[in-house]
Amino acid sequence: MLIADGGGVVAAVRQPVVGARKIVNLLGGFARVAPAAVVEPVLLNGAPGARVLLNGAVDTVIGFAFEAGRTAGSSRCATPTSCTG
């Protein structure tokens, strides 16, 4: 499941996206919309994640949750004031 938060400031999906294939399709579309984006691996609260940079600035942060070695969920933050670091 992917949960997104645009904080009412930027566009984000409004409902949770359920299913690995749907999440991959959604995130895969990001490369078509923003081909110059740079994705960097990061640790978020000690867990694997990624941050997406556009023009050198943080645009999106994605965190992942795991259970029994499988991805159990992910969250996306796209609020400029919350996605720093």
Image (cartoon, rainbow, N blue to C red):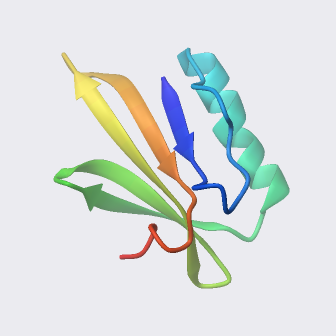
Residue 69, position as x, y percentages in the image: 22, 21
Q: Is residue 56 above or below residue 85?
A: below
Picture coordinates of residue 42 (x, y %)? Answer: 33, 62
Query: From what the image shows, is residue 79 above or below residue 12?
Result: below
Left or right position of 2 against 72: right
* Left or right: 5, with 14 as reference point: left
Point out the residue furthest to the right here: 33
- Residue sitting farthest toward the bottom: 56
Total marks in image: 0
Q: What residue sits 70% from the left and 40% below the top?
A: 28
**Which quarter of the figure has residue 72?**
top left
Can you tell which quarter of the image residue 13 is in? top right
- Write the residue at 16% across / 53% down: 46
**Residue at image location 62% in from the left, 30% down from the top:** 24
Q: Residue at x 56, y 71 (%)?
A: 80
Q: In the picture shown, does residue 74 fall above or below 40?
A: above
Figure quadrant of the C terminus: bottom left
> Does residue 14 sit above or below 48 in this rendering?
above
Q: Position of residue 76 (x, y in %)?
A: 50, 47
Q: Which percent across, then down, holds residue 18? A: 56, 17
Q: Is residue 1 left or right of residue 30?
A: left
In this rendered view, identify the residue nearer to me: 55 or 85: 85
